[in-house]
Image (cartoon, grey):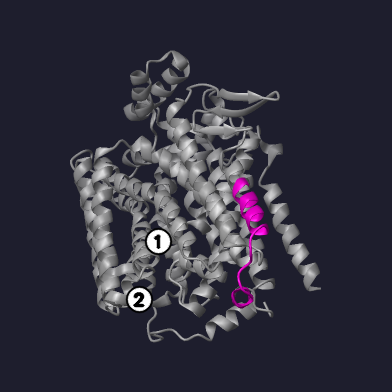
Amino acid sequence: MIPTTIVLLYLCVVLYIGIFAFRRAHAGEAEDFFLAGRSLGPAVFLLSLFGTHMTAFAILGSSGHAFGNGIVTYGLMASSSALVVPLGLFLVGTRIWAVGKRYGFITPVQIFRDRWETSHVGTVIFVVQAALLVPYIIIGVKGGGATLAAVSGGAVPYWLGGAIVALVVMSYVFFGGMRGTAWVNTLQTSMFLLFGAVAILVVSRGVGGFSAGMEALLADPSTAPLLTRERVSPLYFLSYTLIPLSSIAFPHIAIFCLTARHMRQFKRTVVLYPLCLLVLWLPCVLLGVMAHRFADDPRIADKLQARAELAQGGASLEPEARADLQRRAQADDVMLVMLERTAPVWLVGLLGAGIMAAVMASDSQILALSTMFTEDVFAHYGGKERFGEAVQVATGRAFVVALTLVAYAIAVAVPASIFDLAVQYAFSGFAALAPLMFAAFFWKGSTKWGALAATLWVGLATLGIAVFQSLVPAPVGPPVVVWRAFELDLVARTAGGTSILGLLPVVPMVLGSCLLLWLFSALTPKPSEATIARYFPGNQ
Amino acid sequence: MRVVKRALLVGLFVLLYALHQDVWLWRSARPLVFGFLPPGLAWHAAYTIVVAGALWLLSTLAWPHALEREAEQVPLRHPEDEA
C-alpha cells in the first residue's frame, strides 16, 4: 500500500498546483488561460516543454522496447530526437514565438491562416491535427490506469486508476490552464529526470553491478544480440530519423513555443534538450536490456516464454493464441518489476510517481485540443465576437471536461493495441505535416493550395496505412511482401507495421508532403507582398 | 563571411546526421565502454553530448537577433507576471 499511497499523494500535489495556478490567473482572458500570458520563465519553459514532449513511452515504453529489441532503442528514438527536435525548436520554434508575440497568435492554425491568407484551409489542417492528436490523449489515460494498477499490485483496478488520473488531469487543466499545466509538467519532468538516475543506481546494485550484468548477457547466445543492432536493418534505422520531425508539428509543442516570456529562453532549451534526453533515455534503455537478468522472476520468465512461443509458432498460430502470446509478451512493465525486486518499498512508490509523471503527459494534449477548438473553430467562426472572451475561455474549459470524459470512456472500453497503433500513425502523420511549418517560415513561394494538398495527403496516407494494417495481419516472423514489382519489394507487412521499399511509411509520407506542397504552391498565386513582408522582414 | 559561416554550420549538421548512421558499429558488442556500455550505445550517448555542443554553437553563431529585437518590442499584456 505504501507505493500506492505515495503515488496518490503525488496526484494530490499535482492537483494543488493546478488549483494554485488558477488563483494566479487573469480570469476570462484567453491568452492567460491558453498561453499563461506568454510569461513562462526559462526553467519552467525548458522543463515543461520537455515534459510535454515526453509521454509514458519515455519510461515504460522505452524500457519495454529495449527489453525486446536491445540497445537499438536509444539510437532509434533518443539520439535521433536529440538532433532533430532541438533543431526544429531553434529554426521553427523561435519563429513561431516571434510571430505569436507580434501578432497575438495562440495556435499554429492561426499562423497558417495568416501566412497563407486563408480561412477554410486552416480548418482542414485543424481537423487533421485533431484526428491525429486524439489517440495520444486516450493512451495517456490508459497509461495512468495501468500504472496505478501495477504499482498497487492490482489493489486499484485499472478502471479506477484511469478514472483517478483522468479526474486529476482534467481538474488542474480546467482550473490552471496553461499555467497549471506548465507548473505540473515542470514538477513531473524534474521527477522523471531524477527517476532515471535513481532507478539505474538501485537496479545496478540489485544485479551486482552493470559490468557483471552485461558480461552475463554477452555470454548467453539468446541475449547477446540485444547488445548489438544486428536484428535491425540500417535502412529502417535511417528512416526512423524522420519521426522526430513530428515534434515541431505537434500542436501542443507549437503552442508551448508561444508561452516563453523571452525568445532567448530557446537558447538554453535547445542546448539542454539533448542532455535531458540522455539523462532519461539512457538509463531506461540500459534497464530494459538488463531486465533479462531477472529471468528468474515469474513475470519476466512468462514474457520470455511467450516470445519464444511466438517465434517458434510463427504463422501457424491461431489468431486467439497469437493475441494471447502477444499480450503476455508485452514488456512495458519490466521497469516496475525490476524496481519491486531491487528497491525499498518507499522508493518504489516514489519511482512509481515518477512513472505516473511521464504517463500524465496527456494534460498538454487535452489543453492543446481545447485551445485549438476554441480558437480555430469557436472564435474564428464568430463565437468570440458574439459572446465575448470570457465565454470563449469558459468554452475552452467545458471542452477540457468533455474531452477527458470521452477519452476515459473510450480508454476503458477499447483495447490498448488499437491506440498503440494509432499513436504510431500520429507520429508519422505529424512528421509529414512538419513541411508546412518549414514552408510557412522559410519559403516565400508557399501557398494555401500547397498547404491544403500536403494536409490532405497526410490525412489520406495515414488512413490508408491504418486500413492496410487492419486488413493485412502482422506476421510473427519476417515481413510478408504484399506488392512486388520491378524486382522490388514495394510494400510489405512487417511485425511492427508497414515497410515501403524497406523504409518506414514516414519516409514516403514526408516526401509526398514536400512534393505536393511544392507542386501546388508553384502552380497557384502567392500571398500578398504585405503578408510576405510580415514573415520575411528584410533585415532578418 | 556570413555565407561561409552559414555553410559551415549547415555542413556540421549534415555531418552529424550522417554520423548518426554508425554502420561500422552495427554488429559490435565489444569492447564494453566503461566496462558496461556496448559500443553501439556508447557511441550514441557520446553523440547526444556532441549534438548539444553543436546546438550551443548554432545558437551562439546564428541567433536571429533581428527577429528577437522586433518581437521583444511588443509589450506583454501583464508584464508583472512571470510563471
Taking the magenta stretch, the answer to whether it contains residue A307 is no
Tell me the amino acid under the disc marked 2: Asp
Residue A190 numbered tag: 1
Give the left or right position of residue A415, taking residue A519 as reference: left
Q: Residues within 10 Å of mark 2 (few under 14, many from 20)?
A: many
Answer whether residue A86 is visible to the viewer in this image. Answer: no
| Residue found 49% across the figure and 36% down from its top | A465
Name the image quarter holding the C terminus of chain A: bottom right
Do pointers 1 and 2 mark residues of a single chain? yes
Q: In the image, is B26 to the left or to the right of A246?
A: right
The amino acid on which the numbered mark 1 sits, given as a three-letter code, is: Ser
* Residue at x 66%, y 53% (from the top left corner): A519
Residue A63 lies left or right of residue A438; in this view the side is left
The residue that mark 2 highlights is: A32
Q: What residue is drawn where x is 51% and y is 79%? A: A102
The image quadrant of residue A22 is bottom left
Prevailing secondary structure of the magenta residues: helix
The region drawn magenta spans: A512-534
Towards the viewer: A166 or B71: B71
Position of residue A370 in the picture relative to residue A432 (left or right): left
Query: Which residue is more in the foreground, A172 or A130?
Result: A130
Asked whether A526 falls inside the magenta stretch, the response is yes
